[in-house]
Image (spheres, rainbow, N blue to C red):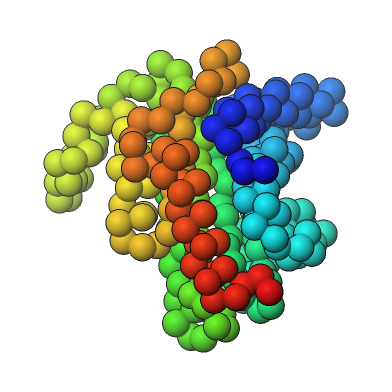
């Protein structure tokens, strides 16, 4: 069975359910930090997204042993500027990095610092791995990288954000943009610069979990098509056997 649009929408809805549950559990343990830190640190809310993406590879004939979705399976991949980096979903078959995914989110109430952190994380992960590939740390086929991002949809993430009066002016494209707008621009540029092979960017909320896709090239349809194209490419090369 193929991965459907309904599977995608169900996964986004389940993401918010898991996030809410984890916040409640953290509160009970008196472990919740500022804002949404308690739910973000745990990572369990992304399990359903990782499972959704893993289904592409299972359906394409990859054995379960080639698909890594938990820390115990070993999600670390070699870097160039550091020894290793842990990704969120890794598919390795016959020493080929079939795909690696970063699964990230940004929520309120404070968006500013977390926005910058997410940008730096995504850039650092991709640049490090791409440089490692140039150093021939990834045998046979060029690695394929995917980026999946959920932005919490609320009035604060939709509100235009001022750019600071810095030493030099910011690119005009950023003026008058919200955090939702900015992340769309960011993801488009990640793919345009070939740091990631595909990105899926949606906004959503616990109150209204149905995903909103602000940028057509970053929607689920394009993301799924890019994954399937990778699978077809490798299949034509005899992977998996």
The quadrant of the rendering that contains the C terminus is bottom right
Q: Position of residue 193 (x, y in %)?
A: 31, 61
Q: Where is residue 182 in the image (x, y as percent from the top left)?
A: 32, 37
Residue 106 visible somewhere in the drawing: no
The quadrant where residue 163 appears: top left
In the depicted structure, whether residue 116 falls above or below residue 195: above
The quadrant where residue 35 appears = top right
Q: 105 or 90, which is in the foreground? A: 90
Asked if residue 5 is positioned above or below residue 69 in the image, the reply reads above
Residue at coordinates 17% horizontally, 50% vertically from top-left? 167
Residue at the location (60% across, 75% down)?
238
The count of marks equals 0
Give the side of residue 124 with respect to residue 83, left or right: left
Which residue occupies the extreme right position in the image? 29
In the image, what residue occupies the spot 36% across and 30% down? 214
Residue 116 on image: x %, y %: 42, 45
- Residue 11, relative to residue 192: is it above or below? above
Query: Most extreme residue toward the top, as rendered?
Result: 207
Placement of 140 over or under 226, stated as above or below: below
Observer-nearest of 161 and 240: 240
Quarter-wise, where is residue 11 in the image?
top right
- Return the residue nearer the eye: 11 or 130: 11
Q: Is residue 110 toward the left or the right of residue 190 in the image?
A: right
Rendering coords of residue 136 (x, y %): 51, 86
Is residue 104 at all visible to an observer of this figure?
yes
- Quarter holding the N terminus is top right
Tell me what residue is drawn at x 68 percent, y 52 percent: 59
């Amino acid at each position: 069975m193929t991965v459907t649009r309904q599977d995608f929408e169900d996964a986004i809805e389940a993401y918010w359910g898991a996030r809410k549950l984890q916040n409640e559990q953290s509160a009970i343990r008196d472990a919740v930090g500022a804002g949404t830190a308690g739910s973000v640190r745990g990572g369990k809310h992304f399990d359903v997204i990782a499972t959704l993406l893993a289904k592409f590879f299972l359906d394409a004939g990859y054995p379960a042993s080639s698909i890594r979705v938990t820390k115990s399976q070993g999600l670390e991949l070699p870097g160039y500027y550091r020894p290793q980096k842990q990704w969120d979903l890794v598919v390795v078959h016959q020493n080929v990095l079939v795909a690696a995914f970063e699964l990230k989110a940004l929520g309120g109430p404070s968006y500013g610092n977390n926005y910058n952190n997410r940008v730096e994380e995504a850039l650092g992960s991709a640049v490090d791995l791409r440089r490692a590939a140039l150093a021939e740390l990834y045998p046979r086929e060029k690695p394929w990288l995917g980026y999946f991002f959920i932005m919490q949809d609320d009035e604060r993430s939709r509100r235009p954000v001022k750019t600071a009066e810095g030493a030099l002016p910011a690119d005009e494209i950023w003026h008058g943009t919200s955090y939702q707008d900015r992340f769309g621009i960011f993801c488009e540029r990640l793919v345009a610069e070939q740091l990631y092979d595909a990105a899926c960017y949606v906004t959503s909320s616990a109150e209204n979990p149905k995903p909103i896709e602000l940028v057509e090239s970053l929607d689920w349809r394009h993301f799924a098509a890019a994954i399937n194209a990778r699978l077809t490419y490798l299949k034509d090369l005899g992977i998996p056997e």
